[in-house]
Amino acid sequence: MVTSAPVSPISGTPVVPGLGLGPVVVARTELDPVAVAAYAARPALEEADALAAFDAAAAEVAAGFERRVAAGSGAAAAVLTASAGLARDKGLRGAVRRHLRTGAGLLDAVHAAVAQFVELFSQQGGLMAERATDLRDIERRVLARLVGLPEPGVPVPDVPSVLVAEDLAPADTAGLDPRLVVALVTERGGPTSHTAIIARQLGLPCVVGAAGALGLADGAIVLVDGGAGLVELGPDPVAAAARVEADRAERAAVAGWAGPGRTADGHAVRLLANVADGESAAQAATGPVEGVGLFRTELCFLSAADEPSVEEQADVYAAVLEPFGERSVVVRTLDAGSDKPIAFATHEGEENPALGVRGLRLSFDNPGLLGRQLDAIAAAARRTGTPTSVMAPMVATVAEADAFAREVRARGLRAGVMVEVPSAALLAHRMLEVVDFLSLGTNDLTQYTMAADRMATDLAHLTDPWQPAVLQLIAITAHAGRGAGKPVGVCGEAAADPLLACVLVGLGVTSLSMAAAAVRPVGARLARVTLAQCEAAAEAALAAGDPAAARDAVRALLD
Ligand code: PEP
Ligand code: MG
């Protein structure tokens, strides 16, 4: 092991809190240039032979992903299956053939074809832009196979280490052994990247978007603080070990937390799960949650070409309601459009889809789509007996909320709307005259308040829910909830940040809904603070000038 001289810490976006101390192991993704040059020096293949070589390499890469599906689970298996599909994609193959026809060598043709799709996906933004990482990973794997090298990937360290990479593709993260990886640091990626998703699933401290991380030498000792988004090089060994030990004790408290959500002085905060389908719901229902605060129905239909029938939809929804029995579930109607294109619902060719016809707006010229979905949700609620509420995404006006609530109540269900657009927060008191509850979608609320694409790595300092302007809108909404005596929850990623959760409670929100894995850390954190402390933290965060100052002020009060 090598200890480097201390330099100022590398900072990035904090994703999973916790401390990880150990030697750096860098996942290098570039191919051996000598092998590539040797391949390029060979006589060029005929087009048909070149295409056959591509087919064989792509099929091997896809088969490799599929083998790992068997070993992975949940999100990991889903992203690996998608990567296998991408490696076998006919469009990609067609692009390789077109480039071969222009006289390009095979390696150049593969590179050009992938670059073309990366550009296309990046332009689409959102979740599609995240696929660019998968495509680059597929390119490296195919090229390695073509030149006769093993597929590149993550080295398996001998001792527990901090894994540093440019960005991690699903295939890299799916095989991670949490006993040998104590933290993850990537130069690229945002809080919704694959790296972030898998780190959350494995509970590994994680910092993404950490510029300069790839400059760390293999073996250098670093302390990763996934809560502060810092990577400290060459920390004082005694102090670092003590901090890691305290962190371990904290994690043990987290593991032992069994609910329900309460502050130290007994103020109740409902802690709920965000789910995507029957499988994730069944898993979440085994944890210490009081129900579901956000069921993202659109995620069930990402690959459906046609709108499923009411009966088919009812089956899908019942699979989510069933595992919760008496516990309540909030179903969100289709949030198609923008970063979640759904073949049967999304409007094509919009100039600016994030500001276009997405979410509830899809029902403006297609009311039947919403009506059929509500019929299916009502049928699933009757069949399972699970207390069911329905909320709409992307609501901008009180009239929209009113019309939606009437449709929902006509089917015997409780109605709410998401607060994702600043206009909804500013008029929260009037929204609450027509609906039963509000749910703050802080991911979009932050994007629209700060006018910054939630997927843009370069704008991560703006797309931060700790921005005082975002907290101000949350305060307005929660205040309206208290005035109306109706629940106001948070179901965006902000709810999963244990420190921010204390601030949200202090602002007056009544429930927090998050990825199931985040519930224990949030529950354990709330159990250590009083409501008065949360209120003081909220005041301090609102008064801060920027997210960093807000975090510091709240830590000073609560830690
Ligand atoms: C949000 O915007 O905060 C939210 C919960 O919705 P989604 O992340 O699905 O857009
Ligand atoms: Mg949203």
Image: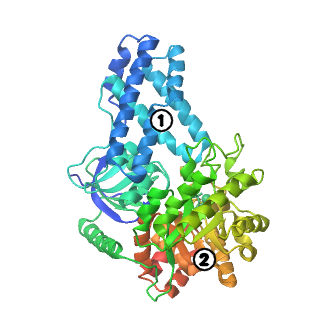
Judged left or right of residue 35, residue 479 is right
Q: Amino acid at mark 1?
A: Leu
Give the residue drawn at x 36%, y 61%: 203
Q: Is mark 2 within 8 Å of ligand 1?
A: no
Who is closer to the viewer here, 357 or 199?
Answer: 357
- Point out the residue furthest to the bottom here: 265
Task: Report the quarter where the C terminus lies.
Answer: bottom left
Q: Residues within 10 Å of mark 2 (few under 14, many from 20)?
A: some
Nearest to N terminus: mark 2 or mark 1: 1
| Residue 43 in the image, given as x and y percentages of width and height | 37, 10
Q: Amino acid at mark 2?
A: Ala
| Residue 436 in the image, given as x and y percentages of width and height | 67, 75
Give the residue drawn at x 41%, y 18%: 52
Distance, label 2 to label 1, CA atoms, is 47 Å
Which residue has dot 2 on it?
543
- Please tell me in which quadrant of the rendered image residue 452 appears: bottom right
| Residue 84 in the image, given as x and y percentages of width and height | 42, 37
Q: Residues within 10 Å of mark 1 (few under 14, many from 20)?
A: some
Which residue has dot 1 on it?
86
Whether residue 325 is visible to the viewer of this picture, yes or no, is yes
> Where 110 falls versus 220 (above or below)?
above
Q: How has the structure been colored for display?
A: rainbow
Give the residue drawn at x 66%, y 60%: 374
- Please tell me in which quadrant of the rendered image residue 83 appears: top left
Question: Residue 409: which disc?
Answer: none
Judged from the image, the quadrant occupied by ligand 1 is bottom right
Helix, strand or loop at label 2? It is helix
- Please identify, in this view, whether the residue under mark 2 or under mark 1 is nearer the observer: 1
| Residue 322 in the image, given as x and y percentages of width and height | 49, 65
- Please tell me in which quadrant of the rendered image residue 9 appears: bottom left
Helix, strand or loop at label 1? It is helix
Who is closer to the viewer here, 212 or 196?
Answer: 196
